[in-house]
Amino acid sequence: MASKQIIAIDLDRVLGPHSSAVFSFMKPYKGAVEAIAKIKQKYDLYVITARHPFFKQRTINWINEYFPDTFVSIDFVYYKTPFGPRSSKSQICKRIGAKIILDDKMSNAVDCAKNGIKAYLYGIQNFHRRNHLPKDIVWVRDWSVVLKKLL
């Protein structure tokens, strides 16, 4: 049986509001849980998130609460040392074999696209960029659009 294609998914402002995993009372975005369940049937899903190590366990707990048994792994990006090795989301995508990333940050999308990873730039906060995106970056407003693009 052929393995599924891998999608890397950011947490903050993609699965839920900014710092949702830090403040456990915050819920995932409307439609995220249902969409992720559908996408998981076709793809292997990984979380890649930038997070201070202090919040690592809270992040894992939040993901396990709202998306139990959904993600193959959760990778933490540390942009600054001494928290861990300096890495980028494109480096992690290449390591795990992700061909697609869903992220809200333009710089991550551009970096991934430059490294051969199809980038979906998520959220209404990126609405103003929708008509001026570099090649290999697609703007997706919300989870209903993500489903249309990926399934």
Image: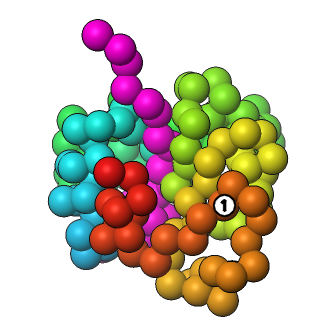
Q: Residue at x 55, y 44 (%)?
A: 100
- As rendered, which of 54 and 59 lies closer to the eye? 59
* Quadrant of res 109: bottom right
33 sits to left or right of 17: left
Whole-percent x and y of residue 116? 72, 39
Q: Residue at x 57, y 71 (%)?
A: 139
Going by the picture, which residue comes out furthest to the top?
1
- The quadrant in which the N terminus is found is top left
Helix, strand or loop for the magenta stretch, by majority: loop
**Within 10 angstroms of label 1, few (less than 14), some, or many (20 or more) residues?**
many
107 sits to left or right of 47: right
Q: Amino acid at mark 1?
A: Ile
Whole-percent x and y of residue 87? 75, 38
Callout 1 secondary element: strand
Magenta segment boundaries in residue numbering: 1-27
Q: Report which residue position mark 1 lands on.
A: 137
- Is residue 57 depicted above or below 21 in this figure? above
Task: Answer whether residue 18 is visible to the viewer in this image.
Answer: no
- Is residue 140 depicted above or below 83 in this figure? below
Q: Residue at x 25, y 75 (%)?
A: 30
